[in-house]
Every structure is written in structure tokens, then in C-alpha cells.
């Protein structure tokens, strides 16, 4: 598989229109990078931007007792669903189906940004994200990413810092 190359233009206009509008409403200027090929995994994103896998932010939608919740996790880690369940006090937590992700966020899996969603959703952000000076996240579709410091990203997402990373064996 070839590594995607960034196109010369890196402007907010490359972001999904809903995400670009959210950036505008927040008064936030970010460098949005657009790639000719879709970037659907954290590993592909890290290779494309030239950063560590742990600097990629995965925006994952789960359902806790049927209610969508967004979990922000670094690209090199997995979410421990039991820790999410415990954190939320839910009886059952599972990955959301693609239709629920799109309905909740307005974006397709692989392009979900950490904020700028169609609906207001509870957000849990794994504390491990704060271990970097900057992180990269999707900008609304699988061809775009943007860079931001993790504390600001978590704040803009309305995230609660938690420890929901799956333990490494």
C-alpha cells in the first residue's frame, strides 16, 4: 500500500463543510491537510502526516445502554469497553453501528472529527492524549486531518478526561 501524499493546499476549506462551520463558530484556525487517497486507519493517518501512531486521535462512537457516547483515544491504543461502562455507570456498552455513527455525528466512520457533530453527545477523552504536544484528528471525511494541541482538542470537544485505555499485556 502506498503512503498518501498531501496536496499543496492545506486550508480549512478542505474540511467537511459541517466541520469547517464548527471551526468558524469557535473562531479556530487550524491547518487542515487533504490527501488524495482516503485514510481509514490510525496507522495510515500517522504514516501520511509523519507522526507517531499515538498522536492520532480516534473519534469512536459507542452506545451506552443505547445512548451514543464519543470516546477519544490515541491511535496506538484500544478502548477498554468495561472501563467505559464503569465510567458511565451503564449496564451495557458496545461499538455503535455505522448508521448510528452517521446519525449521531453527521460523518461516516473513518472521518469523524472530535467536535462539530450533528448532535450533542457525551464525550470521554482518554488521559493518554495529553502526553503529546500536538495530535492529529479527522476533519470530517477520510481524506482530511487537522493538528491541534490535545488539551484544546479535549476542551473544544467538551470531553471529560478519563482512563479508558485497554491495558497492554
Image: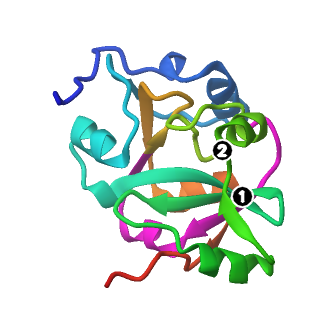
The location of residue 34, given as percent across then percent down, is: 38, 22
Residue 1 quadrant: top left
Crowd around label 1: few <14 · some 14–19 · many ≥20 (10 Å): some
Whether residue 134 is visible, yes or no, is: no
Crowd around label 2: few <14 · some 14–19 · many ≥20 (10 Å): many
Check if mark 2's residue and mark 1's residue have beta carbons within 8 Å: yes
Q: Nearer the viewer, residue 112 or 19?
A: 112
In the rendered view, would you say 8 is above or below 73? Answer: above
The location of residue 128, given as percent across then percent down, is: 44, 72
Looking at the rendered structure, the secondary structure element under dot 2 is loop
Q: For the point 71% across and 58% down, which residue is it?
A: 158
Residue 22 horizontal side relative to residue 121, left or right: left
Q: Nearer the viewer, residue 131 or 57?
A: 57
In the rendered image, residue 135 lying in the magenta stretch gets the answer: yes
Sequence-wise first label, 2 or 1: 2
In the rendered image, residue 45 lying in the magenta stretch gets the answer: no
CA–CA distance in space, label 2 to label 1: 8 Å
Q: For the point 36% across and 60% down, which residue is it?
A: 133
* Location of the C terminus (image quadrant): bottom left
The location of residue 48, given as percent across then percent down, is: 25, 35
The location of residue 12, given as percent across then percent down, is: 51, 23
Whether residue 5 is visible, yes or no, is: yes
Q: Which residues are magenta?
A: 117-136
Q: Which mark is residue 158?
A: 1
Q: Which mark is residue 115?
A: 2
Residue 126 quadrant: bottom right
Q: For the point 36% across and 47% down, which residue is it?
A: 42
**Residue furthest toward the left?**
2
In the rendered view, would you say 160 is above or below 42? Answer: below
Residue 132 horizontal side relative to residue 60, left or right: left
Q: Nearer the viewer, residue 46 or 38?
A: 38
Residue 41 horizontal side relative to residue 91, left or right: left
Amino acid at each position: 500500500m502506498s503512503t498518501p501524499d498531501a496536496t499543496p493546499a492545506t486550508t480549512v476549506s478542505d474540511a467537511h463543510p459541517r466541520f469547517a462551520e464548527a471551526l468558524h463558530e469557535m473562531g479556530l484556525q487550524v491547518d487542515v491537510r487533504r490527501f488524495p487517497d482516503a485514510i481509514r486507519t490510525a496507522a495510515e493517518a500517522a504514516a501520511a502526516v509523519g507522526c507517531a501512531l499515538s498522536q492520532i486521535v480516534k473519534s469512536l462512537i459507542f452506545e451506552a445502554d443505547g445512548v451514543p457516547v464519543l470516546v477519544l483515544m490515541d491511535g496506538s491504543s484500544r478502548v477498554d469497553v468495561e472501563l467505559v461502562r464503569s465510567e458511565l455507570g451503564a449496564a451495557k456498552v458496545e461499538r455503535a453501528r455505522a448508521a448510528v455513527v452517521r446519525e449521531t455525528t453527521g460523518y461516516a466512520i473513518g472521518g469523524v472529527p472530535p467536535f462539530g457533530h450533528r448532535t450533542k453527545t457525551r464525550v470521554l477523552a482518554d488521559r493518554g492524549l495529553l502526553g503529546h504536544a500536538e495530535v492529529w484528528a479527522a476533519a470530517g471525511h477520510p481524506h482530511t486531518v487537522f493538528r491541534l494541541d490535545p488539551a484544546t482538542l479535549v476542551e473544544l470537544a467538551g470531553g471529560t478526561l478519563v482512563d479508558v485505555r485497554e491495558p497492554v499485556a
